[in-house]
Image (spheres, rainbow, N blue to C red):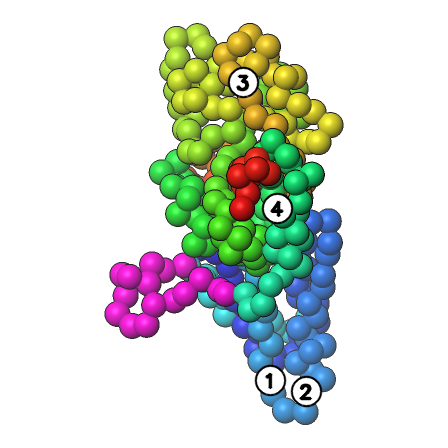
Amino acid sequence: MFGSLVVIYPTAHEGGELIFRHDNHEWKFDTNSLTASQPSPSLAYVAFYSDIEHEVLKVTSGRRVTVTYNLYLVDPTSKVGAPVDTPSFKGISSLQTTLQGLLKSPEFLPEGGTLGFGLAHLYPVTFNTQLQEMANYLKGADAHVYQACRELQLKPLLQVIYDDSESNREIGIMMDTIVSPEYDYEGSSYECALVEEYDGVPVNKTESSKPEDSVWVAEGKSEGEFITWVSAFNVQSRLEDAHTVAYGNQPGVGYIYCSPCLIVRIAAACDRV
């Protein structure tokens, strides 16, 4: 499930406005005013991603009648009919143009490096989710960034960065897989297991920190990797346990929401031809 569609019938009522909140912004959808102002009976509808916080205000009089549809992504190969393509973006985006110009400059990351994009949306995952397969389900601006990098022959990778409580809040452990918190590592910490057992890489989550601030780098257990963040790491990137109740109209057990970051490794200037 990636979103919801709500259809509101033109029944007389007061109240019942829909409130949406995302990324410190709030919108009000006053369906009663919309339908009442039409010259003939009309339906109102609104669609939104499932990571959008939404609230229905109290109906103070009358009857508010709605139908809500849960929207699911479907593997096109499992259905008969024309395949559904990933949205294409015509023309070269400003991001693509900027990246293209930087890659041509010998002064941009002359020794090579890693770019990081904090994603704008949250995505439903399980502990069996294959991160790279999620590229087919990226939304809006996230899909745009991914496509721009692909057009430039770069190899964007979806990664998950875990908190590293043994270092500091600006340091994380980057993984290419989602690891269940249900583990028993004979007294070792979770972070230690991620680095030593699963080859997790200590990284900086902000421009003001560096991998050397990690205890795992200091102890010689990993070299770490510095990330130049093009867009800030999403502070909502939290992987909790398997019992988290998911957003949506039919909350369920077993799903969590996270915001993987997009990582692009750039070759040295002498190799960027």
| Residue 210 horizontal/vertical position (percent) | 66, 23
Amino acid beneath label 4 = Leu
Q: Nearer the viewer, residue 50 or 143?
A: 143
Helix, strand or loop at label 2? It is loop
Rounded to the nearest angstrom, the CA distance separating label 1 from label 3 is: 62 Å
Residue on which disc 3 sits: 223
- Local packing at callout 2 (Cα closer than 10 Å; few below 14, some 14-19, many 20+) is few
Residue 252 placement: quadrant: top left
Rounded to the nearest angstrom, the CA distance separating label 3 from label 4 is: 25 Å
Residue on which disc 1 sits: 42
Rounded to the nearest angstrom, the CA distance separating label 2 from label 3 is: 64 Å
Rounded to the nearest angstrom, the CA distance separating label 1 from label 4 is: 52 Å
Residue on which disc 2 sits: 38
| Residue 73 horizontal/vertical position (percent) | 41, 59
Residue 24 visible in the displayed image: yes
Residue 115 placement: quadrant: top right
Helix, strand or loop at label 4? It is helix
Tag nearer the camera, 2 or 3 = 3
At a point 48% along the width and 42% down the height, the residue shown is 157
Tag nearer the camera, 4 or 2 = 4
Residue on which disc 4 sits: 103
What range of the chain is rendered magenta? 73-88
**Of pointers 4 and 2, the one earlier in the residue sequence:** 2
